Amino acid sequence: MKKNMILAAAAIFALSACTDNFLTVEHPTESPLEEYFTTEEHLQEAVIAAYDPLEWFDWTEEYDPLNILSDVMADQIWVGGSDKSDNQFWHFIMNFEASPKVTVTGLWSDCYSGVKRCNDVLKYIGWVKGLPESTAKLCEAQARVLRVYYYNILWKFWGNIPYYETNLGGDFTCQQFKADEVYAKMIADLEGAIALDALPMYWTGDDLGRVSKAMAYMLYAEITMYQNDASRLSTALTYMKEIIADTHYDLLSDYTILFKEEGEWGSETIFDINYKDDNAVRGWAPNNNPRAAGGTILPRMISPNGWTGDSTHDAGWGFAPVRTETYNMYDAADTRRDATCWNVGAGNNYNPRYQDTGIFLEKYVAYKANNADQVADGDLNFNNNLRIYRYAETLLNAAELVVRNYGTGDAAAWLNAVHGRALGGATIELTLENIKKERALEFVGEGKRYWDLVRWELTDDADGIKASTVLVPDTYGYRTNSWTPSKKYIPIPQSEIDSAEGRTWELTQNAY
């Protein structure tokens, strides 16, 4: 399957977060920045570098795969691993007991690295003499949408965060804004990027993996629906309908290939984070470089430990076992069940680990063929793209917004297109509860469920499918705490609090 040129990006900047090291620069040549980034070619290098941190989330300084970090806080997968000390911060956020010293530190650093690189692009655009206006706008739009994407992750996890659109100087601190203020800044930036009208609705060929207009629209819907911003939800519906009307996008007829290599960048794909195994050189530090272009470690993490049951699947470390209740929520005829849940039976042909159920996340499970062509380290170089936005979500977003009275459209058809694909054309009644249940079935392991439960907490419907009623202690004794609104944001890493102490802008810790 075609893997795009985004994967060929070299790391131009070495970054951390809002500390002195955050603006440390490693020059691609010995030329000063003011001389190097004055050509269109070098500007495009900076654009590609802004995409680079997307690939770091699974591993740089810790394991932070976006889908798993989100879903362990929900009700469909467990954490797993060897015990509660293995990736301890996953277990802590699952039980809503994260602390400043046991929190998601790497995700914070990676996202701010992305923000910094996007800000660089926006600065360098003005350094290139004779740059065509269309090229300038296209570079600007990509950088601004990516910047919002990085801030969106920070905002959802931490809420009250430092926000800046020009890179830091002085003592390398900046103002920390309240979550609602961050939302206002993000959405204004995204609206400005969309207004440039520079992004194509989709990319082809070597440009697959760049942000598109459809991706920007999906990001807009995600942010406004999470904020429950009634003033903008009709616009979000308009954007969803524009994607639906575009003939490029459609559901793949066969759900079972969606997460296989042949399903990558098909008609259902709106945005993926791309990984490859062909000549992939990502490797363990210090001898190699976990930030190098290449594959992902996610399949290794979530596959059964010591697997010997067949010659096609590969062994892994036993993280993120699928809950038995998740498997059981599917109708036996639902094609999504086996495409989502690899039910091998507890203890069969592998070494059971903590929270084992015998069910693994088939969507991203390790296959030996998927890292066969790497040239560095097999753990880090599986070629499974991480699905971020797909057309099924467009349809369900649109159906939900119509049912919630933010506009009109054929919501029943949109809902049943998703439902019917999985169940041989069967239909269900158009209700908000059914839309919510369909999302639960459709997106297991894709990092959607937790954020859905939290945002539904804000709505005035009474169907009971929301965080405070679903995320409660379980009968196994794994989750002993209940979700409450005070748990919406996790603690800011203590290292960030400490690094800002005594400077112009100190950081206030989230409640925990």
Image (spheres, grey):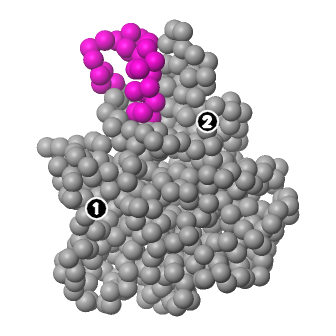
Residue plotted at (72% across, 33% down) = 195
Whole-percent x, y for residue 147 in the image: 54, 38
Q: On the image, numbered disc 1 is attached to which residue?
A: 370
Is 476 left or right of 211, judged from the image as shown? left
Residue plotted at (21% across, 52% down) = 374
Q: Amino acid at mark 1?
A: Asn
Tell me if residue 445 comes above or below residue 134 in the rendering: below
Residue plotted at (26% across, 49% down) = 278
Q: Residue 411, can we see it?
A: yes
The crowding category of the residue bearing disc 1, from other C-alpha atoms within 10 Å (few below 14, some 14 to 19, many at least 20), is many
SS assignment at label 2: loop
- Which contiguous range is marked in magenta? 25-50
Q: Earlier in the sequence, mark 2 or mark 1?
A: 2
- Asked if the magenta segment contains residue 45, the reply would be yes
SS assignment at label 1: helix
455 or 249, which lies in front?
249
Whole-percent x, y for residue 83 in the image: 28, 76
Residue plotted at (35% across, 30% down) = 13
Q: On the image, numbered disc 2 is attached to which residue?
A: 199
Q: Amino acid at mark 2?
A: Leu
